[in-house]
Amino acid sequence: GAGVSQSPSNKVTEKGKDVELRCDPISGHTALYWYRQSLGQGLEFLIYFQGNSAPDKSGLPSDRFSAERTGGSVSTLTIQRTQQEDSAVYLCASSPGQPITDTQYFGPGTRLTVL
Amino acid sequence: GNSVTQMEGPVTLSEEAFLTINCTYTATGYPSLFWYVQYPGEGLQLLLKATKADDKGSNKGFEATYRKETTSFHLEKGSVQVSDSAVYFCALLNQGGKLIFGQGTELSVKP
């Protein structure tokens, strides 16, 4: 079946611009996660959704970062006023959600470059 | 807090050599443990997992055993192939459901 999909696959933007990254989880998966992969910091957790609510936003690095999920499916990660240090690969993952120990399945990522 | 430490790379091996990538963890309780692999130009894929102490995860000739006494989850393969060249990530799943990753180990297998 279809896996996790993310769009765009690549995004180049200028410093100060806003960007939106999209994630389509595996159908029926109630849990959705955003991670960031960068050279300096490795793989870091950003935010977790169970359904449309986000019980854990602890990994969002600043208030310029926000995310929402609608209809228990698609999620959008928004970065406002992008900075060069936001350059990274943003990964989305989903899992069936119950139990919480379920395996997370990752999408191919969005490579963000801030000039 | 929870953390994962992996041996540093890059690791370079000849085809058919034995592979070990060390992974140790610090955690509250007994979290599920995972190895993910990232092939060049591709996303993260689950390689194997173990959910409780003494469990052995295995897939594609790779194995790892959950050792609570040494808080380790070392990845092994008896005979590597060129196609195994990738970056390998060890991870634990904390009680809140987030994955905590090690820094990744790059493996390069030469023919």
Image (cartoon, rainbow, N blue to C red):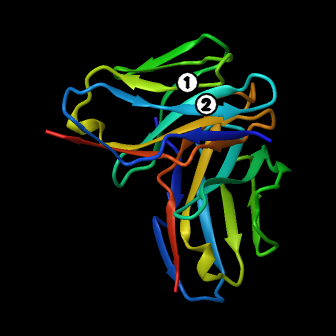
Would residue B95 appear left or right of A45 to someone viewing this image? Answer: right
Circle 2 Cα neighbour tier, 10 Å, few/some/many (<14 / 14–19 / ≥20)? many
Q: Residue at x 82, y 73 (%)?
A: A63
Disc 1 is attached to a residue of which chain? B
* Total labels drawn: 2
Front residue (pair A115, B30):
B30
Would residue A3 appear left or right of B91 to someone viewing this image? Answer: left
Front residue (pair A7, A43):
A43
Q: Residue A13, how many percent across, how many down?
A: 54, 84
> Which part of the image, by quadrant, shows the C terminus of chain B?
top left
Q: Amino acid at mark 2?
A: Thr
Disc 2 is attached to a residue of which chain? A
Front residue (pair A112, B100):
B100
In the image, residue B102 sits, relative to residue A41, either above or below, namely: above
Label ID, residue B49? 1
Label ID, residue A103? 2
Q: Residue at x 61, y 88 (%)?
A: A15
Q: Residue A92, how many percent across, how many down?
A: 60, 52
Q: Residue at x 50, y 57 (%)?
A: A109
Would residue B44 appear left or right of B34 to someone viewing this image? Answer: left
